[in-house]
Amino acid sequence: MHARPPTVRLAQGSIRVLTPDDAEPYRALRMRALYEQPPAFGALPEDEPGLAETRERLRESLDRCYFGAFNDGCELVGIVRFSRYSAANEKHRAYLAGLYVWPDCRGKGFGRALVQRALRRAYNTPGIRRVNLTVVTTQDAAVRLYISVGFRIYGTDLQAFSSHGVLYDEHLMTMPVETAT
Ligand SMILES: CC(C)(COP(=O)(O)OP(=O)(O)OC[C@H]1O[C@@H](n2cnc3c(N)ncnc32)[C@H](O)[C@@H]1OP(=O)(O)O)[C@@H](O)C(=O)NCCC(=O)NCCS
């Protein structure tokens, strides 16, 4: 567990919170992610909202935002969503979802920087004590990345979804947030 918010180090490019103006590249990257095989996500491309709703979703709120990674050419090459649970008795928890880096840009630190940036948000939000996520068990790079920043597997959701006739399991991962007091 990190005692302090993790530092974000990126040799090239940058990370920032996405806004409604990023809707087009965000949606294009998200659709690319949903079509990838083997699947990283249980969500279906046909259920992905259109551009107008995507714009609304990208409006940052206290409890939810999307981070984007940009290469040196200012193209969006990676995404992740940070959300806080909404029920009053669950607001001490947040979760990460939809982490994805454009295949040509993998292995350059964008994925780690996105996760660290989202974790920093958790550390800087008073009251958040835990961050959760689920990850398809066959996504080795993602599982290794999450473990390297402090997540641990606390269970496995067997046959969580099917894709192209194959059933996929998902690890449930969690990480405590030790806020500075
Ligand atoms: C997981 C993913 C986001 C990683 O992005 P990335 O930009 O390539 O990751 P980074 O370059 O920041 O690497 C961070 C760590 O991830 C792990 N990792 C990255 N690529 C890996 C690979 N090919 N094999 C094993 N581990 C790998 C390593 O632990 C690495 O740390 P290290 O370089 O110190 O060994 C990317 O592979 C991806 O988009 N995968 C498909 C989508 C997915 O699985 N999303 C998770 C949904 S829950």
Image (cartoon, grey):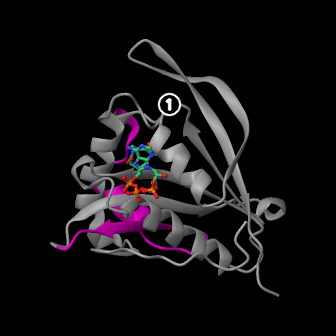
Residue 147: x and y, percent?
61, 52
149, 93: nearer the viewer: 149
Q: Is residue 102 left or right of residue 166?
A: left
Residue at 35% over, 38% down? 34
Extreme residue toward the left, this view: 73
User: Do we see residue 62 in this rendering?
Assistant: no
In the rendered structure, does residue 36 fall within the stretch colored magenta? no
Q: Is residue 14 above or below residue 151?
A: below
Element on which disc 1 rests: loop
Q: Quadrant where the N terminus lies?
A: bottom right
Q: Amino acid at mark 1?
A: Thr
User: Do we see residue 97 in this rendering?
Assistant: yes
Q: Which residue is mark 1?
A: 138
Residue 128: x and y, percent?
74, 70
- Picture quadrant where residue 11 is located: bottom left
Residue at 27% over, 43% down? 32
- What residue range appears in magenta? 46-72
